[in-house]
Image (cartoon, rainbow, N blue to C red):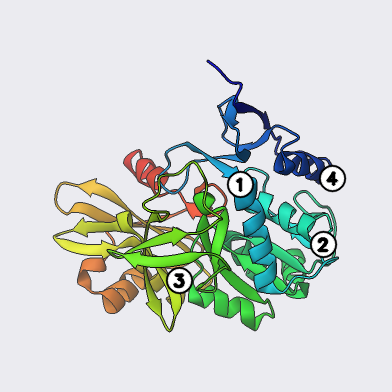
Amino acid sequence: MDTSSQRKILRVSPACEISQLAGEITAALVGDGPTLGFGEISSEYAPSYAAIAIGTSGTSGTSKEIFLSTTAIISSARASNNFIGAKPGQTWSLLLPLTHIAAVNVIVRSMELGTTPIDLRDFDGDYPKANYTAIVPTQLFRALNGDQRLLKHLQSADTVLVGGAALTQSMRNQAELAGIKIVTTYGMTETCGGCVYDGKALEGVGIEIRGGKICIKGPILASSISLNNGWYETSDLGEYDNNRLVVLGRSDDVIISGGENLSLNTVENSLGIAFPDIQFAAFAVDDSQWGQSLQIAVVGTISEAQIVEHLEKDLGSFAKPKGIHHLTSLPLLGIGKVDRKSLAKGIGHE
């Protein structure tokens, strides 16, 4: 195979020191170094334009490699810093693993401010203050439910970006009451991470709703994805409310149970609002009677009767779960999204 027009991929260890990695990212961005590979990367070479390669399973669970150009990465970092009003010399903290675009973004945003992120991945002791940080809803849940060290760190930040998975309004309300300045982000690896903040597209990003699906355009898009006249069609459903994008969930999270359409995302949101101190995941398994039967995974102390009564009252009798499963933790895809396929497989072996 002719690799003369490609770049060698240097796989980044999840334990890599940030000071070393910052130099390698700089070399990758200016084109003096190899493409840096994060996550599940099996390829040895990347297209010549690729500064960063991200291996991700995404929400579908299917492994894929996304190649991001310098333009995409820098455009994303600058637009993010501009949105939150970050100034040169200010600091970011890194609370995310070096296997995802979200962590890469924190590092590049810091570099754009002339600083190095405070590495808190395996930090021992009280967290130092940082102006900005990025987390997933699971981390926010922990901060609001006993992790005092993380809570204090988030409370002291000027802005806390929360992305990677949907954040319920009830958890956001809890966070804001606790003094955490939340900005929710929406995006994916293909869009170089978050490209919509609190329902508003970042500078240079275009958003359209086509056939109910969210479509995205802008310099933040990966060069390795298929586009339609410059637009990337996601699998997410959305709508506008008061000129702000509302993500309704994935187009494939709607199940048909007993002839009724039921959104798993709607079920989770309903439960999250009613019981903000409990973690829920809605998923489905094939069922000879119902076609697909609604199942609920629960982390926390709550009775099955409470769950059933609430869902029937809020969504209707067709939303009565056919199974409720108490777990110690929810399986995740990547850093934030619940692995519904894993839950379904697990129920099949109970």
Q: In this orientation, which residue lies closer to the viewer: 7 or 103?
A: 7
Q: Could you tell which of marks 3 and 4 lies nearer the N-terminus?
A: 4
Residue 318 position in % (x across, y down): 21, 67
Q: Secondary structure at mark 4?
A: helix
Q: Are marks 3 and 2 in contact (CB under 8 Å)?
A: no
Q: Could you tell which of marks 3 and 2 lies nearer the N-terminus?
A: 2
Residue drawn where x is 70% and y is 39% of the image = 14
Instruction: Say which quarter of the image contains residue 32.
Output: top right
- Could you give the CA–CA distance between mark 3 and mark 2, rounded to whole angstroms? 29 Å
Q: Secondary structure at mark 2?
A: loop
With 286 as the anchor, is 302 left or right in this view? Answer: right
Residue 261 position in % (x across, y down): 21, 63
Q: Which three-letter amino acid code belongs to the residue tagged 2?
A: Tyr
Q: Could you tell which of marks 4 and 1 lies nearer the N-terminus?
A: 4
- Could you give the CA–CA distance between mark 1 and mark 2, rounded to whole angstroms? 22 Å
Residue drawn where x is 68% and y is 70% of the image = 82
Q: How many marks?
A: 4
Name the disc covering residue 127, or none: 2
- Could you give the CA–CA distance between mark 3 and mark 4, rounded to whole angstroms? 39 Å
The residue identified by callout 4 is 19
Q: Which three-letter amino acid code belongs to the residue tagged 3?
A: Gly
Residue drawn where x is 49% and y is 41% of the image = 224
The residue identified by callout 1 is 100
The residue identified by callout 3 is 272
